[in-house]
Image (tube, helix red, strand yellow):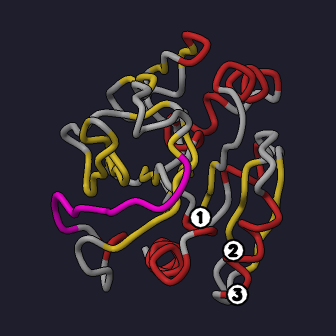
Protein backbone atom coordinates (compact mmCIF):
# COMPACT_ATOMS: atom_id res chain seq x y z
CA UNK A 1 0.00 0.00 0.00
CA UNK A 2 1.45 3.36 -1.07
CA UNK A 3 1.96 5.94 1.65
CA UNK A 4 1.14 9.58 0.90
CA UNK A 5 2.27 12.24 3.34
CA UNK A 6 0.22 15.43 3.08
CA UNK A 7 2.02 18.49 4.39
CA UNK A 8 -0.01 20.30 7.02
CA UNK A 9 0.41 23.72 5.42
CA UNK A 10 -2.74 25.14 6.99
CA UNK A 11 -5.05 24.48 4.04
CA UNK A 12 -8.73 23.69 4.40
CA UNK A 13 -8.98 20.88 1.84
CA UNK A 14 -7.07 18.23 3.78
CA UNK A 15 -9.93 15.84 4.54
CA UNK A 16 -11.26 15.76 0.96
CA UNK A 17 -7.71 15.20 -0.29
CA UNK A 18 -7.13 12.36 2.17
CA UNK A 19 -10.43 10.75 1.17
CA UNK A 20 -9.55 10.99 -2.54
CA UNK A 21 -6.23 9.17 -1.99
CA UNK A 22 -7.73 6.60 0.36
CA UNK A 23 -10.41 5.74 -2.23
CA UNK A 24 -7.49 4.78 -4.49
CA UNK A 25 -6.08 2.45 -1.83
CA UNK A 26 -3.32 4.74 -0.50
CA UNK A 27 -2.50 5.21 3.16
CA UNK A 28 -2.38 8.90 4.11
CA UNK A 29 -0.90 10.95 6.90
CA UNK A 30 -1.22 14.70 7.47
CA UNK A 31 1.87 16.03 9.22
CA UNK A 32 4.19 18.96 9.77
CA UNK A 33 7.01 16.68 10.98
CA UNK A 34 10.13 17.20 8.87
CA UNK A 35 11.43 13.65 9.37
CA UNK A 36 8.12 12.08 8.29
CA UNK A 37 8.00 14.33 5.22
CA UNK A 38 11.62 13.65 4.24
CA UNK A 39 11.19 9.87 4.52
CA UNK A 40 7.75 9.59 2.86
CA UNK A 41 7.16 7.59 -0.35
CA UNK A 42 5.06 10.42 -1.82
CA UNK A 43 4.56 14.00 -0.62
CA UNK A 44 1.61 16.27 -1.35
CA UNK A 45 1.75 20.02 -0.77
CA UNK A 46 -1.86 21.20 -0.70
CA UNK A 47 -2.97 24.77 -0.55
CA UNK A 48 -6.05 26.82 0.14
CA UNK A 49 -5.52 30.38 1.31
CA UNK A 50 -2.90 33.10 0.87
CA UNK A 51 0.64 32.52 -0.36
CA UNK A 52 2.33 34.79 2.18
CA UNK A 53 0.66 33.06 5.11
CA UNK A 54 1.42 29.60 3.69
CA UNK A 55 5.11 30.38 3.15
CA UNK A 56 5.41 31.93 6.62
CA UNK A 57 3.88 28.77 8.10
CA UNK A 58 6.37 26.57 6.19
CA UNK A 59 9.25 28.74 7.41
CA UNK A 60 8.02 28.69 11.01
CA UNK A 61 7.72 24.90 10.87
CA UNK A 62 11.25 24.60 9.44
CA UNK A 63 10.01 22.87 6.30
CA UNK A 64 11.36 25.09 3.50
CA UNK A 65 14.73 23.34 3.12
CA UNK A 66 13.14 19.91 3.62
CA UNK A 67 10.63 20.53 0.82
CA UNK A 68 13.22 21.99 -1.55
CA UNK A 69 15.48 18.96 -1.22
CA UNK A 70 12.93 16.14 -1.57
CA UNK A 71 13.83 13.49 -4.14
CA UNK A 72 10.65 11.38 -4.01
CA UNK A 73 7.54 12.29 -6.09
CA UNK A 74 6.00 15.57 -4.88
CA UNK A 75 2.61 16.95 -5.95
CA UNK A 76 1.63 20.58 -5.31
CA UNK A 77 -2.10 21.29 -5.56
CA UNK A 78 -3.57 24.74 -6.34
CA UNK A 79 -1.71 27.16 -4.04
CA UNK A 80 0.62 24.24 -3.32
CA UNK A 81 1.63 24.27 -7.00
CA UNK A 82 2.28 28.03 -6.84
CA UNK A 83 4.43 27.52 -3.74
CA UNK A 84 6.76 25.40 -5.87
CA UNK A 85 7.56 28.49 -7.98
CA UNK A 86 10.19 31.14 -7.34
CA UNK A 87 7.59 33.66 -6.24
CA UNK A 88 4.03 34.89 -6.58
CA UNK A 89 2.51 38.35 -6.91
CA UNK A 90 0.17 37.38 -4.08
CA UNK A 91 1.65 39.03 -0.98
CA UNK A 92 4.86 39.41 -3.08
CA UNK A 93 5.79 36.07 -1.52
CA UNK A 94 9.09 34.34 -2.21
CA UNK A 95 8.30 30.65 -2.60
CA UNK A 96 10.22 27.37 -2.66
CA UNK A 97 11.92 27.98 -6.00
CA UNK A 98 11.98 24.38 -7.22
CA UNK A 99 10.19 25.47 -10.41
CA UNK A 100 11.23 28.60 -12.31
CA UNK A 101 8.49 31.16 -12.73
CA UNK A 102 6.12 33.60 -11.08
CA UNK A 103 2.39 33.29 -10.39
CA UNK A 104 0.59 36.43 -11.62
CA UNK A 105 -2.83 37.76 -10.63
CA UNK A 106 -5.50 36.84 -13.16
CA UNK A 107 -7.01 39.80 -15.04
CA UNK A 108 -10.66 40.39 -14.24
CA UNK A 109 -13.13 40.95 -17.11
CA UNK A 110 -16.92 41.08 -17.45
CA UNK A 111 -17.02 37.45 -18.57
CA UNK A 112 -14.04 36.36 -16.41
CA UNK A 113 -14.55 36.94 -12.70
CA UNK A 114 -11.64 36.50 -10.33
CA UNK A 115 -11.24 34.11 -8.65
CA UNK A 116 -11.45 31.71 -11.56
CA UNK A 117 -13.90 29.22 -10.07
CA UNK A 118 -15.38 26.27 -11.89
CA UNK A 119 -14.73 23.71 -14.60
CA UNK A 120 -12.23 24.40 -17.35
CA UNK A 121 -10.59 22.45 -20.17
CA UNK A 122 -7.12 20.91 -19.88
CA UNK A 123 -5.13 21.14 -23.11
CA UNK A 124 -2.17 18.79 -23.02
CA UNK A 125 1.08 20.46 -24.07
CA UNK A 126 3.31 17.39 -23.88
CA UNK A 127 3.09 13.79 -22.78
CA UNK A 128 3.77 13.00 -19.14
CA UNK A 129 3.06 10.00 -16.87
CA UNK A 130 0.89 12.24 -14.67
CA UNK A 131 -1.57 12.55 -17.57
CA UNK A 132 -1.56 8.88 -18.68
CA UNK A 133 -5.05 7.72 -19.65
CA UNK A 134 -6.52 11.25 -19.68
CA UNK A 135 -7.78 12.34 -23.09
CA UNK A 136 -6.93 15.83 -24.30
CA UNK A 137 -9.50 18.54 -23.50
CA UNK A 138 -10.91 16.89 -20.38
CA UNK A 139 -12.36 19.14 -17.69
CA UNK A 140 -10.99 19.89 -14.22
CA UNK A 141 -12.21 22.07 -11.34
CA UNK A 142 -10.33 25.30 -10.57
CA UNK A 143 -10.52 27.82 -7.71
CA UNK A 144 -7.72 30.42 -7.87
CA UNK A 145 -6.87 34.09 -8.38
CA UNK A 146 -3.20 33.70 -9.37
CA UNK A 147 -1.66 31.55 -12.08
CA UNK A 148 1.61 30.66 -13.74
CA UNK A 149 1.83 31.45 -17.47
CA UNK A 150 2.58 28.58 -19.83
CA UNK A 151 6.34 27.94 -19.70
CA UNK A 152 9.03 25.31 -20.16
CA UNK A 153 7.73 22.97 -17.46
CA UNK A 154 4.03 23.15 -18.41
CA UNK A 155 2.53 19.79 -19.38
CA UNK A 156 -1.11 20.92 -19.61
CA UNK A 157 -2.64 24.37 -20.00
CA UNK A 158 -6.02 26.05 -19.61
CA UNK A 159 -7.38 29.34 -20.94
CA UNK A 160 -8.67 32.10 -18.71
CA UNK A 161 -8.10 35.29 -20.65
CA UNK A 162 -4.56 34.03 -21.23
CA UNK A 163 -3.04 30.56 -21.42
CA UNK A 164 -2.16 29.40 -17.89
CA UNK A 165 -0.29 26.38 -16.60
CA UNK A 166 -2.76 23.77 -15.37
CA UNK A 167 -0.23 20.96 -14.80
CA UNK A 168 3.54 21.33 -14.43
CA UNK A 169 6.55 19.10 -13.84
CA UNK A 170 10.23 19.53 -13.15
CA UNK A 171 12.06 16.36 -12.23
CA UNK A 172 10.24 14.79 -9.24
CA UNK A 173 8.17 17.94 -8.57
CA UNK A 174 4.80 18.25 -10.26
CA UNK A 175 1.75 20.38 -9.66
CA UNK A 176 -1.85 20.93 -10.64
CA UNK A 177 -3.44 24.37 -10.56
CA UNK A 178 -6.84 22.66 -10.38
CA UNK A 179 -8.09 20.53 -7.50
CA UNK A 180 -7.87 16.85 -8.53
CA UNK A 181 -9.82 15.81 -5.43
CA UNK A 182 -12.78 17.84 -6.78
CA UNK A 183 -12.34 17.00 -10.48
CA UNK A 184 -14.24 13.73 -10.84
CA UNK A 185 -12.73 10.91 -12.90
CA UNK A 186 -10.08 13.15 -14.44
CA UNK A 187 -8.78 14.23 -11.04
CA UNK A 188 -8.91 10.70 -9.69
CA UNK A 189 -6.80 9.53 -12.63
CA UNK A 190 -4.21 12.25 -11.96
CA UNK A 191 -3.94 11.12 -8.33
CA UNK A 192 -3.77 7.47 -9.40
CA UNK A 193 -0.98 8.31 -11.84
CA UNK A 194 0.88 10.16 -9.09
CA UNK A 195 0.67 7.04 -6.90
CA UNK A 196 2.26 5.01 -9.73
CA UNK A 197 5.32 7.27 -10.16
Q: Earlier in the sequence, mark 1 or mark 3?
A: 3
Magenta residues?
Answer: 117-127
Element on which disc 3 rests: helix
- Residue annotated with mark 1: 42
Task: Give me the residue at 29% from left, 33% from top.
Answer: 149
State the residue at coordinates (73%, 82%): 22
Above or below residue 166? Residue 68 is above
CB-based contact (under 8 Å), mark 1 and mark 3: no
Q: Position of residue 50 (x, y in %)?
A: 69, 27
Q: What's the distance in space between the residues labelled 1 and 3, CA to CA?
A: 16 Å
Q: Is residue 192 left or right of residue 134?
A: right
Residues at marks 2 and 1 touching, judged by CB atoms closer than 8 Å: yes
* Residue 26 found in image quarter: bottom right
Q: Is residue 75 visible?
A: no
Tell me where residue 89 appears, x and y as whole percent. 49, 16
The secondary structure making up most of the magenta span is strand
The 10 Å Cα crowd at callout 2, few under 14, some 14 to 19, many 20 or more, is some
Q: Pointer 2: what residue?
A: 3
Of pointers 2 and 1, the one earlier in the residue sequence? 2
Quote the CA–CA distance across marks 3 and 2. 13 Å
Give residue 88's mark. Answer: none
Amino acid sequence: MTEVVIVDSGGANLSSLRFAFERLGARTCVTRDDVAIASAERVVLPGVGAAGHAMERLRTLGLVTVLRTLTQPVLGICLGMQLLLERTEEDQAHCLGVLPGIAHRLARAVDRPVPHMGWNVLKQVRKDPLLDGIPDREYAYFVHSYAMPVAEHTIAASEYGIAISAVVRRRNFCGTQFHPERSGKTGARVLENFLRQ
